[in-house]
Amino acid sequence: MGSNDRAEANQLNSDKLDQILAKLDKLDTLEAKIDHVSSTLREDLGKMEHRLDAQSARIVSLERQGFTEERNVEFREYLQLLEEQYVGLRIIIGGDWNSRIGELNSGLEELYEGTNLMDSRCSRDKTVNSLGERLVDTMEYFGMYVINGRSCHDSHGEFTSFSHNGMSVIDQVWVNTLTLEVVSHFRISPFSAASDHEPCLLELALEGDIPSPVPFSVLLQPKFKWVSQTRKAYQEALSGKILSSGNVWGDPSMAYEEWKIIIRDCAKALGMYFPAKWKNLSIPCHNYWFNSDCATKRYEMRRAHRKLKRNYCSELLTDYVTRRRQYKRFIKQRKKNTSTYYANH
């Protein structure tokens, strides 16, 4: 090999070495950046957990590898620990699950009474895979409900992930039953070019953040109010109306309608009939009759429902059905009493 060939070979080796060193330098820089970001995140999480009340919140992180059986076991241990150590804890779990659940996890109507969410849910993504079935089974076992597709701002269950594989709803937010009542809004944020996933935005109405009452209109049903002092005048008015009509009604349905008109007109003339009307009330925009007693009854019913789903047996079924009937009777009476109160004031 001549001197020129050796010089050329040495130059090539030198160039390759420079390229390798440049790549290593980039890797070192990237590793330093990753360490810095990780350190910053750990500090921020530490500060956040320090500020949060130990009885009100916990931050738990899991590596995102899809909801495999191994991850399922680990995740169940976390949820079991939270349930055993903290009573009355509101739990919110969200992120990229890599699990497609379609329109699963529809709940009972009673669970969503007095909330801003719908019991049935919709989703643009109709596909259910094995990871999604496993996720739903675990979540329902621990009394968790997905928020996607239940809010008026996400009524269709919009797609959250866009990639070469297609569109899907694999970014989901799950909450337990105690959190359902404080969910104000949920929506999917406008798409960001920096990621193939859209952020899920959840807004809660906690103590101190609950909006002040806004004007709300209710339709008061027509009603009759008997006044004993006008009994004689009422009887005379009815007799006069009947005699003046001079009609003999052969059709029972027609006679029924005519009698209703006569009774209403006579009562109205004497101030005993009040037609239907709208009344503005200074109450929250959701169910105005729903108070703390309703919430207590609902919580007892939900707790019985969770126990039943964990162990289907006749005793728990009887307990749940009994509490559900009690809750329905209670809210029915509450609605009636509230409507009567506002109708008379």
Image (tube, rainbow, N blue to C red):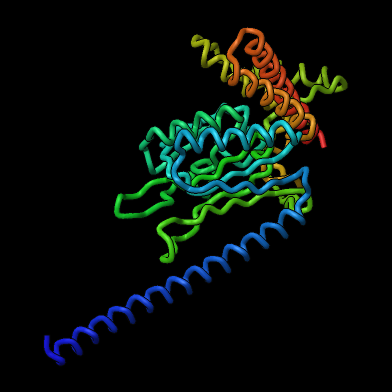
Task: Look at the image and tell me whether residue 339 can be seen.
Answer: no
Nearest the camera: 79 or 141?
79
Give the quadrant of residue 88.
top right
Depicted 96 relative to depicted 48: above or below? above
Quarter of the rendering occupied by the C terminus? top right
Where is residue 112? Give x, y as percent: 62, 33
Q: Residue at x 50, y 9 (%)?
A: 250
Which residue sits furthest right?
A: 229
Q: Residue at x 43, y 76 (%)?
A: 25
Depicted 264 relative to depicted 13: above or below? above
Q: Please state if 48 lies on the left or on the right of 159 as rendered.
A: right
Q: Please state if 72 lies on the left or on the right of 159 as rendered.
A: right
Nearest the camera: 259 or 197?
197
Where is residue 155? Give x, y as percent: 48, 44
- Count every numbered label the image shows and give the total: 0
Q: Residue at x 60, y 10 (%)?
A: 313
Q: Please state if 138 lies on the left or on the right of 157 as rendered.
A: right
Where is residue 84? Give x, y as percent: 72, 31
Where is residue 140? Give x, y as percent: 55, 29
Quarter of the rendering occupied by the N terminus? bottom left
Depicted 27 relative to depicted 64: above or below? below
Task: Look at the image and tell me whether residue 203 can be seen.
Answer: yes
Nearest the camera: 257 or 51?
51
Which residue sits furthest bottom?
A: 4
Give the quadrant of residue 256.
top right
Give the quadrant of residue 297.
top right
Q: Please state if 136 lies on the left or on the right of 47 as rendered.
A: left
